[in-house]
Image: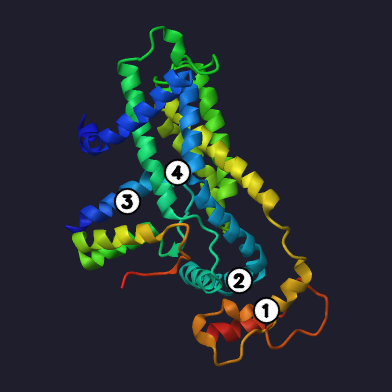
Amino acid sequence: MHRIGVALVWLWRATFGALFPTTCKYHPSCSQYAIDAVRQKGLVRGSVLAGWRLLRCNPWSHGGFDPVR
Amino acid sequence: MMHSLILGSPLTPLEHAARHALNWLHFNLGLPWAWSIVALTVIVRMLLVPLTVRQIHSMQSLQAHAPQMKEIQKKYKGDKQKQNEELMKFYRENQINPAASCLPMLAQLPVFIALYYSLRHFSSEPPAKHPGSLSFLHFIPSIADHTTTHWGGYVLLVVYVASQMASTLYMSATVDKTQRILFMVMPLVFVFVIARFPAGLVLYWVTTNLWTVGQGLITRRLMPKPAAPTAEKRSSRTPPRDPGSGDDGGGNGAVPESPQPKPAAPRSQQPPRKVRRKKKAGRR
């Protein structure tokens, strides 16, 4: 099941993600975080975590080292 | 079409919004369709300006921290993963971050898709009574057609590549050489994909890139010149830490007020690297 999520992230990376320089202020980057999250927590919880991370990756946050826990 | 079924339905309201905005710009302001796209792009980018102001501040403080960052990069030269981790920690501790963030980038995607769909409708049922009104600056006959259907489209593609490269130069805060080169090459690959898009979409992309470049130029003007390098640099290279405080992995140890200022020797280029690197490598 989680393969779907991972495939979607790769699809993003291959299309629009590649149009922008890496802009993420976190490490691992948002897309890598999404892959890790889906692998570790499953599709549903992983997607929620990834969504929350995307929301945190905004101009008012400070970024930093933030792996999936 | 399959993908229009998947993407189209949730994005239909957005497409309508884009269409309405374009209509308004065209009929109420009297702009030609092509210029309506340009105007819409500019409006979107203007809405995003408050977001970039934050980034500009961040980049300003980044200049002050550049020596320490170089230090980290050298220290973890062999290990990209670790280097990134440490840099991120350093950013966090100092409350700076040169990168833009993913959210504003993602915010552009719906605009892009909405424009894509409205332009596709343009080509199937052109809103114009007379055929010339979809043209742009007399060299692109129709912004709803594929870019490669006319020589003007190729000109636009060249401008796209140039603008994408330029905007990459201004946007990417990364200091990493290979990454920078990769981003410079990217548009050359992408030009083949983008050639399949309606010309109006390329116009959007060119406009947004040029906006980025303009913003970058203004930002550079506003940014103070980086502090005179020699003094800063040397102090950042003093062995920074007392042995106990290792856990934060090396970023902030290099703050200028480090405990042992180096005796004056003005050799700014070649510090005794080897010894120090070994010591630090041992610690991690």
Q: Disc 1 marks which amino acid?
A: Arg
| Disc with the residue nearer the chain's start (3 vs 4) | 3
Can residue B270 be seen from the camera position used here?
Answer: no
Tag in front: 3 or 1: 3
Tag in front: 3 or 4: 4
Query: Label 3 to label 1, Cα distance in Å?
Result: 40 Å
Q: For the N terminus of chain A, which image quadrant?
A: bottom left
Under tag 1, what secondary structure? helix
Q: Where is residue B165 in the image (x, y as percent from the top left)?
A: 56, 41
Q: Mark 1 lies on which chain?
A: B
Q: Where is residue A26 in the image (x, y as percent from the top left)?
A: 44, 64
Q: Position of residue A20 (x, y in %)?
A: 46, 47
Q: Check if mark 2 and mark 1 are on a common chain.
A: yes
Q: Check if mark 3 and mark 1 are on a common chain.
A: no
The residue wearing badge 1 is: B273
Query: Label 3 to label 2, Cα distance in Å?
Result: 31 Å
**Would you say the residues marked 2 and 1 are in contact, meaning their CB atoms lie under 8 Å apart?**
yes
**Would you say the residues marked 3 and 4 are in contact, meaning their CB atoms lie under 8 Å apart?**
no
The residue wearing badge 4 is: A19
Query: Label 4 to label 2, Cα distance in Å?
Result: 29 Å
Q: Which chain carries label 3?
A: A
